[in-house]
Image (cartoon, grey):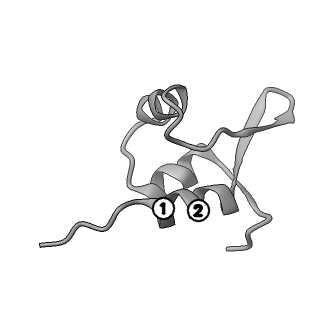
Amino acid sequence: MSNTELITCQEVLRLTGIRSRSTIWRKMRKGGFPHPVDIGGGRIRWRAADISEWINALPLRRY
């Protein structure tokens, strides 16, 4: 996946393991998730680079 690529909400859900759009919007409101970009016509997309950075910033769970 190219870091300049724009991805859909469905792709964001698949990549992050988040199960619902509501959770994404809730995390955005709290400042804990990247915001999408408006590409016109009522459509939004997320920058793949922003989602990758968010995933890489997640804390590791150690046992």
Amino acid on which disc 2 is placed: Glu
**34 or 21, nearer to the observer:** 34
Q: Residue 14 appears at what percent x and percent y? A: 46, 57
Q: Quadrant of residue 11?
A: bottom right
Query: Residue 19: image x %, image y %?
Result: 36, 44
What residue sits right under mark 1 in the picture?
A: 57
Image quadrant containing the C terminus: bottom left
Residue 42 as seen in the image, left or right of residue 52: right
**Percent x, y for residue 57?**
48, 61
Q: Residue at x 45, y 27 (%)?
A: 26
Q: Distance between the residues labelled 1 and 2?
A: 6 Å
- Circle 2 sits in a helix, a strand or a loop, which is it? helix
For the point 69% across and 40% down, the residue is 36
Tag 1's secondary structure?
helix
Query: Which quarter shows the N terminus?
Result: bottom right
Circle 1 packing at 10 Å, graded few (<14), some (14-19), many (20+), is few
Task: Examine the image and state in which quarter residue 59 appears.
Answer: bottom left
Relative to residue 17, is residue 36 drawn left or right? Answer: right
For the image, the number of numbered tags is 2
Q: Are marks 1 and 2 in contact (CB under 8 Å)?
A: yes
- Residue, x 65% and y 48% (percent of image)? 8
Q: Residue 53 carries which label?
A: 2
